[in-house]
Image (cartoon, grey):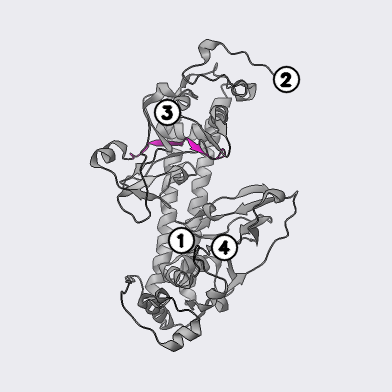
């Protein structure tokens, strides 16, 4: 039976909408119980960011963009840079507890909301994002952030989305028309504490991860090594013949210096395939079966995990979705520009599938955590880059992995690295659980008033 909603024209508000779908009963929220206000009434600032060209050469200051929101936080893992004037920087600098709303993207990403917590960052934000600053006597920013990530916030986002081909948007005027509950500040403070603790756990995870990487570099006596580009150098003919490469960059002295250091390691070395299994296992795709697809954007590079997956029917998977993934696999991007994208699979899902753009590494001589730190370290990262070849899209072939030298790490060092990485990932899990708890408590708070 068709459902009908009758709306008074006086209730249209600033975001005047006449499309029938906007008024479907499934989108309507009962605001008759408890105190509810429109978001515009709890804000002291609502603004778009900067429209400037961004770069990857770290020229200027960090600029957050729409895909820098992850799990309710702004994260700087893949942040780009922009050159801004002093006046622009003063106006658009991110402040701790600013809330950012992704206003335009593919439909599933519109409305992604995160809070900025990095007091040491000198960053600004791009025009894809809307910055929200709350009146703290009414609504705490952490509460607004979690509410917009809750099912009640998502319901309103779905309602207000303006859909187009492969894209959707919610503008600032429409966002301010959302309704938000306004519980006592003491109740909001409990949510804020959960969000703040979640951020602290995320920061702890990065600390453990960096310590694991430092343990490796110290063991190899490479912690202070800074590879330098040489303008002039030479190589012997025999090396050229053995490698079957004649491009000059391959023979840069910095690569040889790293390789020499590994070969001088006190416990020995070997080529990568001898110590780490390179999996070429493929998966047989069934059209009507659901798969968890892993692509480049799903890797959290700062802590080395596959952070998310996309649930897709086999019939809808892209042609490159062919590789079988298992728990404890380490995936490494084969494309030169994204070789730093290295992540450990933590999921136990049996239907994980990855792109052919990944190298998939499995445990042989080392634990999965050691495989991760080795491949993510600047040591092997440089050697991966050396092996990249091609014209339009340079990439590392699986055969080229056989040229990469790997140290035979001492057992005690392996155990220390494994422990540190596991602690890092425990902190990530704790961070996620705290966010889920915060979201659950906000939803229960609203439902108890219904």
Q: Which residue is mark 2?
A: 2
Work out how far the residue at label 2 is from the one at label 4, CA to CA, in angstroms.
Answer: 48 Å
Comparing 423 with 7, the one in front is 7
Q: State the SS at label 3.
A: helix
Q: Which residue is mark 4?
A: 358
Q: Earlier in the sequence, mark 3 or mark 4?
A: 3
| In this picture, residue 446 sits left or right of residue 99 | right
Q: Name the quadrant containing residue 45.
A: top left
Q: Earlier in the sequence, mark 2 or mark 1?
A: 2
| In this picture, residue 353 sits left or right of residue 81 | right
Identify the mark at residue 337; answer none if there is no mark: 1
| Residue 108 included in the magenta stretch of the image | yes
Comparing 182 with 391, the one in front is 391
Work out how far the residue at label 3 is from the one at label 4, CA to CA, in angstroms.
Answer: 48 Å
Q: Which residues are magenta?
A: 94-109
Q: Earlier in the sequence, mark 2 or mark 4?
A: 2
| Residue 101 included in the magenta stretch of the image | yes
Q: State the SS at label 4.
A: strand
Q: Which residue is mark 3?
A: 186
Q: Quadrant of the C terminus?
A: top right
């Amino acid at each position: 039976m068709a459902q009908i909603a009758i709306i008074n024209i006086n209730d249209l508000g600033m975001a005047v909408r006449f499309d029938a779908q906007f008024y479907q009963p499934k989108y309507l929220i009962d605001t008759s119980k408890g105190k509810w206000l429109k978001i515009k009434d709890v804000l002291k600032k609502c603004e778009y960011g900067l429209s400037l060209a961004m770069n990857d050469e770290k020229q200027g200051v960090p600029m957050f963009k729409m895909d820098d929101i992850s799990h309710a936080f702004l994260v700087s893992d893949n942040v780009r840079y922009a050159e801004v004037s002093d006046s622009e920087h003063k106006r658009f600098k991110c402040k701790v507890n600013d809330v950012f709303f992704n206003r335009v993207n593919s439909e599933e990403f519109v409305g992604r909301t995160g809070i900025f917590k990095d007091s040491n960052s000198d960053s600004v934000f791009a025009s894809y994002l809307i910055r929200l600053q709350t009146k703290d006597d009414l609504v705490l920013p952490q509460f607004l952030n979690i509410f917009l990530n809750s099912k009640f916030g998502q319901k309103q986002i779905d309602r207000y989305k303006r859909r187009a081909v492969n894209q959707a948007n919610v503008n600032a005027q429409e966002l301010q028309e959302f309704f938000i509950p306004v519980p006592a500040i003491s109740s909001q403070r409990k949510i804020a504490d959960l969000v703040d603790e979640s951020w602290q756990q995320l920061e702890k995870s990065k600390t453990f991860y960096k310590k694991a990487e430092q343990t490796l570099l110290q063991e190899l006596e490479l912690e202070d090594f800074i590879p330098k580009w040489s303008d002039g150098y030479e190589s012997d003919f025999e090396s050229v013949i053995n490698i079957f490469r004649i491009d000059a960059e391959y023979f840069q002295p910095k690569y040889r210096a790293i390789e020499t250091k590994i070969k001088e390691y006190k416990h020995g070395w070997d080529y990568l395939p001898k110590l780490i299994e390179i999996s070429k296992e493929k998966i047989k795709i069934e059209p009507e079966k659901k798969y968890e697809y892993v692509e480049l954007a799903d890797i959290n590079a700062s802590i080395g995990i596959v952070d998310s997956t996309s649930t897709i029917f086999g019939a809808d998977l892209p042609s490159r979705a062919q590789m079988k993934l298992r728990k404890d696999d380490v995936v490494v991007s084969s494309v030169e520009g994204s070789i730093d994208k290295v992540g450990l699979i933590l999921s136990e899902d049996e239907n994980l599938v990855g792109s052919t753009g990944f190298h998939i590494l499995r445990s042989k001589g080392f634990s999965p955590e050691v495989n991760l730190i080795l491949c993510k370290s600047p040591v092997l990262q440089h050697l991966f880059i050396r092996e990249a070849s091609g014209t339009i899209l340079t990439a590392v072939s699986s055969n080229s992995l056989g040229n990469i030298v790997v140290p035979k790490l001492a057992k005690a060092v392996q155990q220390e690295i494994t422990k540190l990485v596991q602690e890092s990932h425990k902190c990530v899990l704790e961070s996620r659980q705290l966010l889920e708890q915060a979201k659950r408590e906000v939803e229960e708070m609203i439902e108890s008033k219904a």
